[in-house]
Image: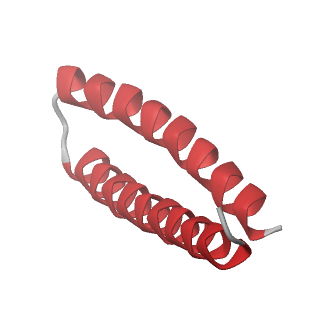
């Protein structure tokens, strides 16, 4: 593969990782809003688990963006 194609592929991968990071950030914000708005203990517990999972997903996406940016 030529250098130009490799660079294009890397940029495309970086853009996809950035898009995933933005999507997860949006979902995390929505989940925090839902968490702040509910009073049912079962729904609160669900939000806590969802926030934890989204934070892990965000961290992975952030590391991918950071690695591709170097």
Q: Nearest the camera: 31 or 13?
A: 13
- Looking at this rendering, what residue extends furthest in the bottom direction? 4
| Residue visible at 56% across and 36% down in the picture | 56
Picture quarter with the C terminus: bottom right
- Percent from the top left, x then y, of residue 3? 73, 73
- Percent from the top left, x then y, of residue 14? 58, 67
- Percent from the top left, x then y, of residue 58? 54, 48
- Image quadrant of residue 45? top left
Check the image and tell me how it is coloured: secondary structure
- Looking at this rendering, what residue extends furthest in the right direction? 70
| Residue visible at 23% across and 23% down in the picture | 41
7 to the left or right of 61:
right
Picture quarter with the N terminus: bottom right
In the picture shown, does residue 35 fall above or below 33? above
- Image quadrant of residue 8? bottom right
Q: Nearest the camera: 28 or 5?
A: 5
């Amino acid at each position: 593969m030529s250098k130009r194609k490799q660079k294009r592929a890397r940029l495309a991968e970086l853009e996809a990782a950035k898009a995933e990071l933005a999507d997860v950030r949006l979902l995390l914000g929505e989940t925090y809003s839902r968490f702040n708005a509910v009073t049912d203990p079962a729904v609160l517990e669900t939000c806590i688990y969802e926030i934890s999972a989204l934070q892990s997903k965000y961290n992975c996406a952030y590391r991918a963006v950071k690695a591709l940016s170097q």
